Image: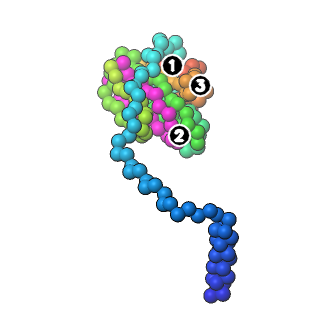
Amino acid sequence: MRNALRTFATVVLAGTSVGLMACVVESTPPPPASPPTSAAPAQPPYVEPPPPAPASEKIQWNTADGRPSELKPGVPESFWVWHDGRGQNWHLRTSTTKYLHQFSGWAVPDTGQITGFHLTRADYGDRIRLGTGGISFDYHTMAEEEGFDFATSGDHCVKFDLHIDGANHPDRIFIGHGNVHPQHALFMLCP
């Protein structure tokens, strides 16, 4: 064992000395590292996405019963929408794999109000706002799963207007346990 270590050390030292012979060594020490900044850079002001137009597609909200069965780590960029509690407790998630994608849009109760709101994950620069008209959001993420939960006051339609990288992709929107796709990126789930 001792000979093996000595041989290893000789090989490493020989390799190191060859490398040093080919290097130029300067005697000036490197400049001191700058201290870490304590404040994050200022963010640009939040610009709300345009409010959704009237939705022509109405989907029965029992379609949205239960968490989508295909929502799991490693799925490509998608939206996932479901509810529990007779349409009063809603969940919206986004997913990506390894690339950065932009998710934007709205979740708006048709006649009721949002009575509760909870972010599931928030990263620096995420723009998610609860306002009188509903929830607007615009964020970039590489997270496997990100989004929010919200509650509504009673049995009311909820309008969704969902965009990935600024475009409509209804084939990347999954609703409820059955993973149903709407025909359009702007749709309503109604009792």
Q: Amino acid at mark 3?
A: His
**Which corner quadrant of the image does residue 123 belong to?**
top left
Is 122 above or below relative to 59? below
Q: Element at badge 1?
A: strand
Circle 3 residues within 10 Å: few <14, some 14–19, many ≥20: some
Relative to 113, 174 lies left or right: right
Residue of label 2: 142
Colour scheme employed for the rendering of this structure = rainbow
Which residue, as the protein is rendered here, is positioned at the far bottom?
A: 2
Can residue 117 be seen here? The reply is: yes
- Residue 152 on the magenta span: yes
Q: Is residue 158 above or below residue 100?
A: above
Q: Main secondary structure of the magenta part?
A: strand
The type of residue carrying mark 2 is Met
Which quadrant of the figure contains the C terminus? top left
Q: In the rendered structure, find residue 187 and report the number of the disc placed on it.
A: 1
State the separation of the CA atoms marked 1 and 3: 12 Å
Q: How many marks?
A: 3
Residue 49 in the image, given as x and y percentages of width and height: 45, 20
Q: Residue at x 59, y 25 (%)?
A: 169
